[in-house]
Every structure is written in structure tokens, then in C-alpha cells.
Amino acid sequence: MNRVDEHGHDVEYNFKDAEHPLQLVFVCAMWLTGFDASTVSTMYLDKPMKDHTLMQTIARANRVTSFKINDVEKKNGELVDYYNVFRNMKEALKNYARGGEGMGAAPVQDKEVLFQLLDDSIVQGTEFCAERDIDLGKILKSNDVFKNVDLFGKYADRLLTKDEWRKAFAVYENTITSLFEACKPEVVGNPIVRSIAVFQYLRGVVDSIIEQKDIEAVSARISDLLDESVVVDASTDLQHTNPEFVIKQSGRTWDLSKLDFEKLAAEFKQINYKNIEIADLRAFIQKKLDEMMQQNATRTDFAQRLQEIIDRYNSGSSSADNYFDELLKFAKDLKEESERHIREGLTEDELEIFDLLKSRNIALCIADTDTIATPGKITADYGYLRLRREDYQTTDVERWTEFVREQESNWKDAFVYFKHEESGIGPKLAHQMLELLV
């Protein structure tokens, strides 16, 4: 137990590491009742236990974690009882979980309840889809349902009609998938798995558009789901069975700097699934805006404007065509904003500083020294100049005087400071500038 590997890690460290090959341990003592590893998913019980020892033991597998296996988060654990320890669990739960009689239903129920919940969730999810002209029952009757990419594109387009539809479907799919994971291993091999795969397939198509993400993990997860749940009958030709589940990455490859807005507008008029095109453009805009806001925090007005466009469409006051046109115009303005630092001869970091100063009406200190020269950017309704060189000639004073005069429409006041040094030339230069300004 105390031996360490070449990395200096002991058994406990490696077992808690979800990525480490060590996935199975035989335990006793504190590892049984006091060991905490959130990724432990299954516990096999083969000896008698009761009371607090039993409660502590079964708690080893009940941790939730954001770690994903095949893109699925752990939300419950599994107990496999070889010794009929469960007969002692009700008493233990009464004493340690419920706090006594009359405190509500027992937190542990027969697994048959989960099977019923899974069935009910699939029925409810199917009814939700049917109310929106998405007939999952019909497509399940087709042998090549998972090859019919166009059909799922049609259904994804339907779900993308409204944000609330898409989000509600995601809740149904999450519930169904979570219950399916909780029903393993008994549910494996049940024909119901095909229905679960349909929900996950459709969710994968929608997510590939909305989130513009790599969905290889989703495809792999559903392929594994189908592979492990094949119900073999006399009509199954295993020798000629090929993998049938493939999700193709949907949507365009977007580049804001190369967008042809007129071409996009023309193509949209001819496209079949307008909601998918809208969702694709919106997802790209949202992702690009998030990146740009990380570069420059003052771009919140763009975020507010985008939300207003989305809210108008979701409220029904904007048609799909108008919605797409508004998103295109927004993308065009976003492109101009993304190039503003180039037009102003600044880096993105410099632009953010100037924008922050301007948003708070704080004047940039325009400094002129022997080593630096600050850009003459106007960020407030007043000016602040620090002219720190000692070798100013008349032409230099005239140049700075002209700069101040040019800001007459921008500045209410100008504060100009010359360097205070031993020769006393600063007051002379200031007086010279005042005469030129009069």
C-alpha cells in the first residue's frame, strides 16, 4: 500500500486519478468506510454489514462528479450485493438517513421504479416532440433510421424554431440518458435502447449546430450504446452488419473576415432548413462575440444588442427572414468592430485601454519624453498633456499648440504641464504656448 510508482504516486493517488489504468481494487477497513474517490461508480458487497458501517460503505459510490466517460457525467453509483446486505439497509436508513419514522418515503427504492421512470420519460419526450410535428415513433419503425441524416436535419430545424423548444428537448434527453445510465446493466440489450439512441442522436445534431463543437465523443458514445444493446434474433445477419450510427458535423466553417454578406443573404432565400442556418449563424456570432469581449470588456453594448435581436424573434415579433437579416447586419457590424484596432493603428490591448478610459471619461495622459511618446488619443472631454522634454524648440511648441487647438470641439479644458527643471525653461515654454493659443 505504501509502495510508490516511478512518478512517486501510491495506490491511493492512482486510484483517485480517473485517467489512471488502475480501475479495480479489493478493499477493507478505512478504504471501505472512509475512503473518498468521487469517480468510484460501482461497489461489490460480499460480506455482512449493518448500521453506520453499511451507511459509510454504500456512500463510497454515491459521489457525483463532472468527470465524463464517453461524454456522460457520473450522477449516481451502482451497488452489487452478493450477500443480501440490502436486508439490513432499511434499518440503517431509518436510523442514519431518515432520522426516524414518519419522515417521508425511504430514499432507496426497488430498481423496477427506475425502469418505469425511464419508460415514462421516453413517452413524455416522444409526446413533446409529436406536439411539434416530430414523429419519433415513425422514424423508429425504419431500419435505416440512423442513416437518414436529412430527416434528423428536418427535426433539428423544427426544434430550433424556438429557444424554449430546444432547451426543453435537452431536458428530456438529459433525463432519459441519466435514467438509462442508472438502469444499467439490466437495461442493456433491451429494445428500448434504440429509442434512447434516437433522442441522443437528435440532441447531437442540434448541439453540433448550436455549440459548434466537435461531436466525435457523442458519436462514439451512441455507437457504443447501440453496439452493446443489440438484440440478436434469427433475422440478424451479424456477418454483414455494419456500423450505422454516424453524426456528421453540421454547419459552415465560418471566418468573419471573409464573410460575403450578400451571398449569405441570397443563399438563405433558397435554403430548406432556415432555422438551422439561423442557429448556425447565431452560434458563430455568439462565439466570436465572446472572444471579442474577452479581448475588450467594453463591448457589452454588442452583447445587449444581440440579446435584443434574439428576444424579438423568440417573442414572435420577428419573422425568420427578418431575424436572419438582423443577424447578418449584426455580423457585419461585428466585423467592423473586430478591425477597428487596425484602422486606429493600435493593438487589441491598447484599444481596450482607450475604450475603458473613454467609457469613464478619463483623459489619457498624453506624454512626450526623451524616451516615449504616447498616442494622441482623445478619451475624455478634457485634455491632459505632460511635455517632459528639455530641448523643445519654437516649432515644437507650435506643433503642440496646434494639437491642443484641434481639440476645441472635443475638450472643455486642457491641462498642459511642462517639465520643472533647474534651468527654469518650463514656465517660458508654457507662456509661449499661451500666447500662441490666444
Image: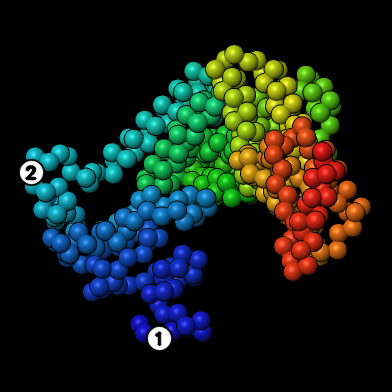
The answer to which of 315 and 129 lies nearer the viewer is 315
Please tell me how crowded label 2 is: few (under 14), some (14-19), or many (20+) other residues with Cα within 10 Å: few
The amino acid on which the numbered mark 1 sits, given as a three-letter code, is Arg
Q: Residue at x 38, y 74 (%)?
A: 12
Q: Quadrant of the C terminus?
A: top right
The image quarter in which residue 113 lies: top left
Is residue 373 left or right of 308 when viewed as pictured? right
The answer to whether one can see residue 136 in this image is no
Of callouts 2 and 1, which one flags the residue occurring earlier in the amino acid sequence? 1
Instruction: Tell me residue 105's x, y (percent).
Output: 17, 39
Q: Quadrant of the N terminus?
A: bottom left
Q: Residue at x 79, y 50 (%)?
A: 431
Is label 2 in a helix, a strand or a loop?
loop
The amino acid on which the numbered mark 2 sits, given as a three-letter code, is Glu
The image quarter in which residue 40 lies: bottom left
Instruction: Tell me residue 334's x, y (percent).
Output: 73, 35
The answer to which of 337 and 243 lies nearer the viewer is 337
Q: Which residue is mark 2?
A: 101
The answer to which of 19 and 354 lies nearer the viewer is 354
Q: Which mark is residue 3?
A: 1
